Image (tube, coloured by chain):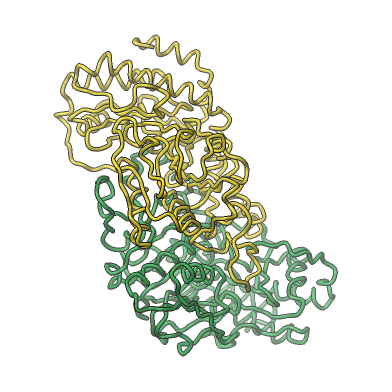
Chain colours: A yellow, B green
């Protein structure tokens, strides 16, 4: 592990993915951005793609739909490649929240013997909010169970008589679940793994999943999300939100609703073509880099964070809030400290390092292996160390104004 | 009315909105585009705006959310201006389908005495599909009633014990409902009126509405839609799709879901910022032109279509499929003809006129008063007349391949 900056620079020099950094806009080279797990960087290709798309709109007008209509499935197939799904199993559309809502209702409709919903208390709030709403609407019990704060939910935590929603990588601790070890009816949220961590849905026998595209898939703020339904389940499920883009015969306007064959039945309204174009571009870069290579670099980067945490930060009151075993970790590391919030403020305002704060006490450092360098991690940790040594977190305005 | 091209050109010369055409990309001046009611043209400002937005993403990265987070309400307020609503009553988000789904469930949850859903058979299919799905899920009756084929649903058609969904302007006939005349619990779909026809939601006492932005609001293919909830109702309703952007305290991640105050409670997942920027730009042009001026020109344009239909087309087997009274009409006119489908094909392939076909027998001509000229209408009608006189509709391949 690189304990000197020169060693970190040597790792960058040997990095087979080093060239991918140039595929992204790096507006300020001094700033170290370790929040690509909240919002990924802008790929250079996306600007051109959006320019081409508005060109199509301006020139082809409504006839552009002959091509645009394929965007949700074509983009879904591109995402499928980086999450280990087959073509026709992934659809890019709507938000993660709406997609989760659709899948949970679809399963409950198909399997009335499921009498409860479940998730872990540390799961991302929007997943829990969706379940709370569905539980109330359907008169079902929602079981919110405690899970290991460091290693996340385990297979034994999953109730057999419930539909459970879990995150593949936990948004706070970065704990990574072993998909193959889990049984039961589960909808996985891949938001914090897809694009940086291999997912392998089909190989792991995963039935249902959703995820966002604006983190490691670099599709931009609020870009369309996706949903995955294993082929074998598709014809048994139907979306509760019936819209004309999910209808079997979209332009036979006089008939009752009948869901389309395959994954398209999970579309609802007119898909957002601008957003989907950005998703396709973002995913293209990740697919080109290759998930295995990205994972290898991501592990090396998070290992470097942990080594420097042990060497420099432990003595300053920091504690590792993520699994030490890289196999059980995603692509971010949480460093716990009682002053985490002002430390995050000081990092941003005084050290030009962008982390993310996650309550109650975590400085979350995300590495996006397509563009994060080893020297970025080294510099961030070095600036963090210096700042806390000097007590600068006590000099910033701790007013809680923040947005993810 | 202009029965010669010179007269049409004279109307353009006097048109106070003539300058607005330059605000849009007109890629092919010979092509007459009369399908802005399916997909509006690209405003020139939208390209620049998207370029600025990707610049913000690239430079500000996650901190861009300090501004982006206002996009759904800020864009909603801009839409409110052109549909006669107050600030805080409109939210730009999701698709029309998803927004309709949210509002219908919200009302049914708040008013369990509503034991049925209703719509007219001629309403846009996605509205009916949404209702079919909700009726099945909740065990409610769905009453699909016949309405006047030319003048659309009338106040007496609306059942008092049901929640009814109606279009303000009918997608096929162009019939315009008088909002003030209707009572009962109604969700209005404004997709075919907003931006070309005054809506005046508050003045008419409308309680609930949804609509798309890619027609007369020129926001681009599949751009985010909007929903309207009258202020007085907002706190009584809650969205069935509970997501973190509709939560009262978005970053207090440990609490149960509690809907935010006001219209924001109807947000679900992370809003699509790219799409919302395009909505804001599109709406800005329309607001600047002014709905009253747009309406005046729209009426004059549709009057010209009808005058030329009477003068030229009636003798060729065409029949007016829209109300003759401009007060009962939106911004498109349907011309019925037994060969409507091949006539539409021939118009596109041989005459460079873009209409829309609407089954079973309508050539739909939409005028977008911000950029459609009187000579455009005259040319389209002239080319249509010539084409049918020569029987060219019998020479095209009638293979039914089309997309709205």
Query: In this orientation, does residue B81 appear?
Result: yes
- The percent coordinates of residue A179 (x first, y second) are 47, 35
Quadrant of the rendered image containing residue B109: bottom left
In this view, which residue lies farthest toward the bottom?
Answer: B156
Q: Is residue B30 above or below residue A89?
A: below
**How many callouts does the rendering have?**
0
**Is B148 or B242 nearer to us in this picture?**
B242
Q: Say which residue appears at 49% left-offset and 31% top-offset.
A: A24
Q: Is residue A296 above or below residue B302?
A: above
Direction from residue A177 to residue B299 in the image, left or right: right
**Is A232 or B349 nearer to us in this picture?**
A232
Q: Is residue B243 above or below residue B162?
A: above
Direction from residue A34 to residue A44 in the image, left or right: right
- The percent coordinates of residue A200 (x first, y second) are 53, 34
**Is A14 or B103 nearer to us in this picture?**
B103
Query: In this orientation, does residue B60 appear?
Result: no
- The percent coordinates of residue B62 (x first, y second) are 36, 39
Quadrant of the rendered image containing residue B312: bottom right
Q: Say which residue appears at 56% left-offset and 84% top-offset.
A: B146
- The percent coordinates of residue B299 (x first, y second) are 54, 80
**Is A147 or B295 nearer to us in this picture?**
A147
């Amino acid at each position: 592990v690189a304990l000197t900056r020169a060693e970190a620079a040597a790792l960058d020099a040997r990095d087979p993915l080093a060239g991918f950094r140039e595929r992204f806009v790096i507006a300020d080279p001094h700033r170290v951005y370790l929040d690509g797990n909240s919002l990924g960087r802008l790929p250079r290709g996306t600007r051109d793609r959006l320019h081409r798309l508005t060109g199509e709109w301006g020139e082809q007008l409504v006839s552009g739909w002959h091509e645009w209509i394929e965007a949700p499935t074509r983009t879904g197939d591109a995402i499928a490649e980086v999450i280990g799904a087959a073509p026709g199993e992934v659809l890019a559309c709507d938000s993660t929240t709406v997609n989760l809502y659709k899948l949970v209702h679809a399963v409950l409709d198909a399997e009335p013997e499921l009498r409860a919903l479940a998730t872990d208390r540390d799961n991302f709030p929007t997943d829990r909010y969706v379940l709370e709403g569905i539980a109330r609407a359907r008169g079902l019990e929602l079981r919110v169970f405690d899970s290991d704060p460091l290693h996340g939910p385990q297979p034994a935590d999953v109730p057999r008589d419930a539909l459970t929603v879990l995150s593949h990588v936990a948004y706070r601790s970065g704990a990574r679940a072993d998909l193959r070890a889990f049984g039961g009816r589960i909808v996985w949220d891949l938001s914090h793994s897809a694009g940086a961590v291999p997912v392998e849905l089909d190989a792991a026998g995963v039935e249902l999943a959703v995820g966002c595209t604006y983190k490691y898939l670099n599709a931009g703020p609020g870009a369309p999300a996706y949903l995955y339904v294993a082929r074998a389940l598709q014809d048994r499920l139907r979306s509760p939100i019936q819209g004309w883009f999910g209808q079997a015969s979209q332009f036979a306007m006089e008939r009752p609703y009948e869901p389309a064959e395959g994954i398209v039945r999970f579309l609802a309204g007119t898909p957002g073509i601008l957003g989907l174009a950005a998703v396709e571009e973002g995913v293209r870069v990740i697919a080109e880099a290759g998930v295995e290579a990205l994972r290898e670099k991501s592990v090396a980067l998070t290992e470097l964070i942990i080594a420097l945490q042990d060497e420099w930060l432990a003595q300053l009151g920091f504690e590792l809030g993520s699994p030490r075993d890289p196999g059980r970790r995603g692509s971010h590391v949480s460093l716990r400290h009682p002053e985490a919030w002002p430390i995050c403020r000081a990092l941003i305002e005084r050290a030009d390092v962008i982390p993310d704060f996650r309550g109650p006490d975590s400085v979350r450092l995300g590495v996006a292996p397509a563009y994060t360098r080893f020297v970025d991690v080294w510099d961030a940790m070095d600036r963090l160390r210096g700042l806390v040594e000097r007590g600068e977190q006590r000099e910033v305005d701790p007013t809680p104004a923040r947005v993810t």
